[in-house]
Amino acid sequence: MLVWNVFLDDFNTHRIRTLNIFQHASFLDGCRKAAKKYADDKQAFAEQIEKILKYYFWSKTEYEIVLDTWPPSPRFHPEKVDVYDQVMLNWSVFIAWLWSNREELTKNRRVS
């Protein structure tokens, strides 16, 4: 099972929770297609995964959290961070891990 967790603001419960990005069915499907299409080209695979990640998670309110200091400081301006930003913080690790797990990625089973 593929798991890559990020932080997410659950606006229904007003809590920060974690989200496994591979639970997003369309994102997972896009990754599977990229793994099959670019099975022998890591660079092209990485470029396609970044496009898919950006399409589904970049600058979308439901996938953003706001970072602030505690206690709040007038010198610090809260920052919005989305799922795309969180994955890109460790992009080289993420893409190396995903590339090494291509076989798991291409299995046709649901992520829990």
Image: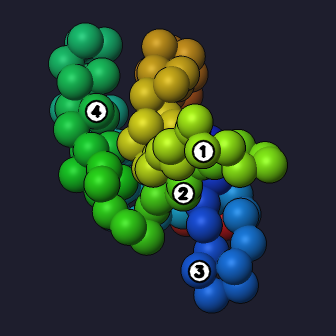
Q: Which residue is depicted at the point 50% across and 43% down?
A: 77
Q: How many C-alpha atoms fall within 10 Å of the one at disc 1: few (<14), some, or many (≥20)?
A: few
Helix, strand or loop status at disc 2: strand
Q: Is residue 21 visible?
A: no
Number of residues whose C-alpha sits closer than 10 Å to that of mark 2, classed few (under 14), some (14–19) or many (20 or more): some
Label 4 to label 1: alpha-carbon separation: 35 Å
Q: Is residue 45 above or below residue 1?
A: above
At 67% across and 43% down in the image, what residue appears? 73
Q: Secondary structure at mark 1?
A: loop
Q: Name which of mark 3 and mark 1 comes first in the sequence.
A: 3
Image point 43% across, 37% down: which residue? 85
Numbered disc in front, either 2 or 4: 2
Quarter residue 23 falls in: bottom right
Q: Is residue 108 left or right of residue 43?
A: right
Q: CA distance from mark 2 to mark 3?
A: 10 Å
**For residue 11, which numbered disc appears in the image?**
3
Q: CA distance from mark 4 to mark 3?
A: 26 Å
Indicate which label's residue lies in the foreground, 1 or 2.
1
Residue picked out by circle 4: 50
- Residue at the extreme right of the image, as rendered: 71
For the rendered model, the colour scheme is rainbow
Amino acid at pointer 2: Ile
**Residue at image mark 2:** 65
Q: Which residue is mark 1?
A: 74
Residue in view at x 78 percent, y 47 percent = 70
Of the residues under marks 1 and 2, which one precedes in the sequence? 2
**Cβ atoms at labels 2 and 3 below 8 Å apart:** no
Q: Secondary structure at mark 4?
A: helix
Q: Nearer the N terminus, badge 2 or badge 4?
A: 4
